[in-house]
């Protein structure tokens, strides 16, 4: 896409130049000189000589409202191609032009902030965006929410969560938003408060944690992260029974989080002697949602604590009847090879073979080297990209 836009750039330059030319009808000689400059610059671009093109454009004497647009485009193209130094030079050059109006300069400043961000110069990006935000005569062309959003991204990187909350609020308040956007912003604010609460919890500042949690809840009371944090608070206070219950309800709510919470759940279960309950809960939840995270947690549990009967039955059933991923099959074989499994080796081998055969069903054997399209049978011509002789083993 970036390449396509880059190819369209000369066209944009040409229209910019045409518009500029109309405004200079009275000065034929000057027009000829200007058009010569543009053609030269465009030729360098087409020949993939961006530095030479840049020299021509940056030394172009008259940038006005018509041609400035194409300069913005040029700078943004460089940034999108990862050539941030060149993008910076274009936008700095635009800002330094005395004949541009403040709207164009603000636009160039906004782009400059994005260049700094792309170059990892977050301090400079922040000061450019803040200066724009504080500008009382901010151009209508630059949406306040775009600046707020850029600032928010910076503060996420620098982990300045209070400032990130402020930037999110400024964004949310800048315009009457769709309720979907608002929900998204509220969820961001909740995450930021939870980050702060996490940090306070690790320092043992429980009073501060409670305050931050209240603020997080007021932004999004249904957040799963808040549920997790409530478990963490109980865990931190060694209230293992409460933490265990809380973590289990998180898993029942979203089983993907089990990987993150398993160690803590296991510790709680050991502390309050509820390992069998953990096993039962994992099996119950797995049968409900069939999530591989849960199955793998069951296998980890079995390897550590032994195959209690309901677990071994479940593993047998899953190996023979379900299409598992390769990691789950590996973990299952690893478990069956331990003394803890009640599944005998011969039966285990048969189950492995069945499970691998389930896995291979539907796995495409061939793949196009050109576009990555996968297929079951060898073809001379790729049905996706239409290239010939590009099919190889997947
Ligand atoms: Zn292809």
Image (cartoon, rainbow, N blue to C red):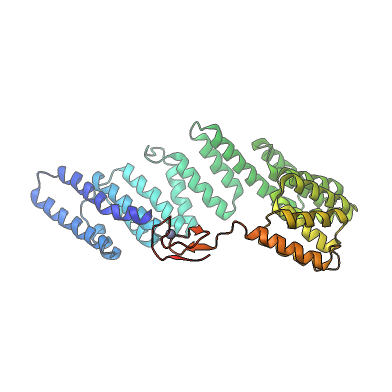
Q: Is residue 249 above or below residue 312?
A: above
Residue 343 in the image: x percent, y percent? 84, 63
Q: Is residue 150 above or below residue 174?
A: below
Q: Residue at x 49, y 35 (%)?
A: 174
Residue 235 in the image: x percent, y percent? 81, 51
Image quarter for residue 119? bottom left
Q: Splitting the image into four quadrants, where does ligand 1 fall?
A: bottom left
Q: How many marks?
A: 0
In terms of depth relative to the viewer, which is nearer, 15 or 118? Answer: 15
Q: Is residue 392 above or below residue 115?
A: below
In terms of depth relative to the viewer, which is nearer, 299 or 356? Answer: 356
Left/right of residue 175 with respect to residue 296 in the rendered view: left
Residue 96 in the image: x percent, y percent? 30, 53
Image quarter for residue 320? bottom right
In terms of depth relative to the viewer, which is nearer, 391 or 329? Answer: 391
Left/right of residue 143 with respect to residue 96 in the rendered view: right
State whether residue 14 appears in this view. Answer: yes
Left/right of residue 352 with respect to residue 373 in the rendered view: right
Left/right of residue 16 with respect to residue 247 in the rendered view: left
Residue 25 in the image: x percent, y percent? 11, 44
State whether residue 206 appears in this view. Answer: no
Q: Residue at x 74, y 52 (%)?
A: 294
Residue extending furthest top? Answer: 176
């Amino acid at each position: 896409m970036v390449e396509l836009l880059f190819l369209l750039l000369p066209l944009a330059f040409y229209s910019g130049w045409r518009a500029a030319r109309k405004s200079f009808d009275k000065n034929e000689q000057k027009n000829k000189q200007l058009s010569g400059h543009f053609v030269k610059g465009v030729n360098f671009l087409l020949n993939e000589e961006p530095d030479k093109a840049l020299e021509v454009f940056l030394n172009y004497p008259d940038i006005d409202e018509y041609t400035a647009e194409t300069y913005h485009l040029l700078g943004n193209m460089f940034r999108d191609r990862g050539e941030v130094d060149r993008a910076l030079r274009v936008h700095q050059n635009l800002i330094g032009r005395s004949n541009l109006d403040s709207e164009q300069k603000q636009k160039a400043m906004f782009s400059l902030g994005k260049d700094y961000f792309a170059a990892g110069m977050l301090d400079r990006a922040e000061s450019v965006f803040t200066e724009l935000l504080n500008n009382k005569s901010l151009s209508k062309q630059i949406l306040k929410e775009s600046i707020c959003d850029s600032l928010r991204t910076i503060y996420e990187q620098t982990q300045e969560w209070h400032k990130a909350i402020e930037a999110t609020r400024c964004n949310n308040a800048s315009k009457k938003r769709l309720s979907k956007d608002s929900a998204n912003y509220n969820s961001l604010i909740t995450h930021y408060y939870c980050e702060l609460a996490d940090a306070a919890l690790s320092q043992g500042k429980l009073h501060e944690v409670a305050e931050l949690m209240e603020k997080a809840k007021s932004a999004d009371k249904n957040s799963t992260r808040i549920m997790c944090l409530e478990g963490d608070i109980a865990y931190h206070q060694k209230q293992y029974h409460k933490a265990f219950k809380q973590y289990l309800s998180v898993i029942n709510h979203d089983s993907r989080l089990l990987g993150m919470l398993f160690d803590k759940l296991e510790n709680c279960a050991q502390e309050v002697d509820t390992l069998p309950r953990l096993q039962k809960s994992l099996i119950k939840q797995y049968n409900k949602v069939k999530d591989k995270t849960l199955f793998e947690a069951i296998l980890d549990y079995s390897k550590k604590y032994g195959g209690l009967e309901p677990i071994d039955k479940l593993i047998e059933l899953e190996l023979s009847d379900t299409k598992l991923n390769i990691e789950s099959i590996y973990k299952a074989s690893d478990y069956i090879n331990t003394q803890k499994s009640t599944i005998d080796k011969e039966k285990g081998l048969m189950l492995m073979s069945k499970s691998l055969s389930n896995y291979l069903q539907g796995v495409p054997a061939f793949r196009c080297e050109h576009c990555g399209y996968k297929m079951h049978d060898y073809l001379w011509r790729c049905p996706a990209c239409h290239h010939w002789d590009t099919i190889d083993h997947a």
